[in-house]
Image (tube, rainbow, N blue to C red):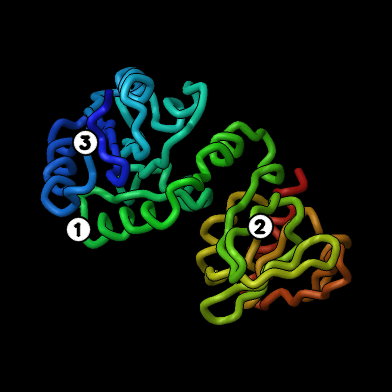
């Protein structure tokens, strides 16, 4: 019989760096006594075994390990019944995928305030996890089939990229213009969204607009774009040459 208390959080740390393991373990023990560290995994294979044997409800997972990535490890599990907080560095290539899929993460070296915020988010919502969607996105051969997860006033918006026509910036928020005349206000700036979508068929043609190449209905001529929902979007003068190069390359 497990001695884990009902109100406690059971966790496993999976990282191939012993220093990171101990550092995170010490911080959790010091500041979060309600979190019980059930075990440590030194690589992906050990991580799978620890998760299967110990059945934690929270996993701290290194993105890049010696034998496999954190995403590869998760894809080998029969079921994901826990919440994941990824461990990565700011410069790591996976940081963009983590942000795109609205996954929780900690940057090395650990900041105590960020750790506290991650634990607080976990406590508020232990059931919801976007990892299955992230794994599906990573398998998608076409970027347009990927699902973007964004926060709205009503909760989370899950939308396929091919259903986004354009995005309008509105200070600290953005309006997502979708097919079927739907429009959603999300709590991300246009610059944030540009960073997530610039390599997925989107282009910022104007300081206020991000457009999806799939919904450009006419070969651009001049300074105006015509989109599938009837919108006319301006191309800023300084972006015109860059846009033409992008548009022509995207069509090849």
| Residue 213 vertical position relative to residue 55 in the rendered view, above or below | below
Is 185 in front, or is 96? Answer: 185
| Residue 206 appears anywhere in the view | no
The crowd level at tag 2 (other Cα within 10 Å; few <14, some 14-19, many 20+) is many
Q: Which residue is mark 3?
A: 37
- Measuring from the top left, give residue 243's x and y in whole percent: 68, 63
Is 142 in front, or is 175? Answer: 175
At horizontal 52% and vertical 45% (from top left) the residue drawn is 130
Residue 14 placement, left or right of 223: left
At horizontal 60% and vertical 80% (from top left) the residue drawn is 170
The C terminus lies in quadrant: top right
Alpha carbon of mark 3 to alpha carbon of mark 2: how far? 42 Å
Q: Dot 2: what SS?
A: strand
Query: Is there a contact, CB below 8 Å, between mark 3 and mark 2?
Result: no
Is 12 in front, or is 91? Answer: 12
Q: Which mark is residue 112?
A: 1
Q: Which residue is mark 2?
A: 202
Query: Is there a contact, CB below 8 Å, between mark 1 and mark 2?
Result: no
Q: Dot 1: what SS?
A: helix
């Amino acid at each position: 019989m497990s001695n884990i208390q009902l109100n406690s959080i059971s966790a496993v740390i999976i990282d191939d760096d012993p220093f990171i393991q101990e550092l995170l373990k010490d911080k959790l023990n010091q500041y979060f006594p309600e979190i019980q560290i059930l075990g440590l995994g030194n690589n992906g294979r050990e991580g799978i075994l620890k998760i299967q044997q110990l059945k934690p409800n929270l996993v701290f997972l290194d993105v890049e390990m010696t034998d496999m990535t954190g995403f590869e490890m998760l894809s080998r599990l029969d079921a994901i019944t826990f919440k994941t907080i990824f461990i990565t560095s700011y410069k790591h290539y996976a940081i963009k995928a983590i942000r795109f899929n609205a996954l929780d993460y900690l940057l090395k070296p650990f900041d105590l305030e960020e750790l506290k915020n991650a634990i607080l988010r976990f406590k508020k919502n232990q059931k919801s996890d976007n990892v299955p969607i992230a794994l599906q996105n990573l398998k998608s051969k076409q970027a347009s089939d990927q699902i973007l997860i964004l926060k709205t006033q009503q909760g989370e918006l899950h939308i396929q990229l091919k259903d986004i026509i354009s995005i309008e910036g509105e200070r600290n928020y953005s309006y997502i213009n979708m097919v079927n005349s739907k429009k959603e206000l999300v709590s991300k700036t246009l610059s944030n969204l540009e960073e997530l979508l610039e390599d997925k068929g989107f282009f910022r043609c104007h300081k206020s607009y991000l457009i999806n190449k799939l919904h450009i209905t006419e070969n651009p001529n001049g300074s105006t774009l015509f989109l599938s929902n009837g919108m006319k979007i301006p191309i800023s003068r300084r972006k015109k040459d860059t846009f033409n190069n992008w548009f022509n390359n995207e069509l090849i």
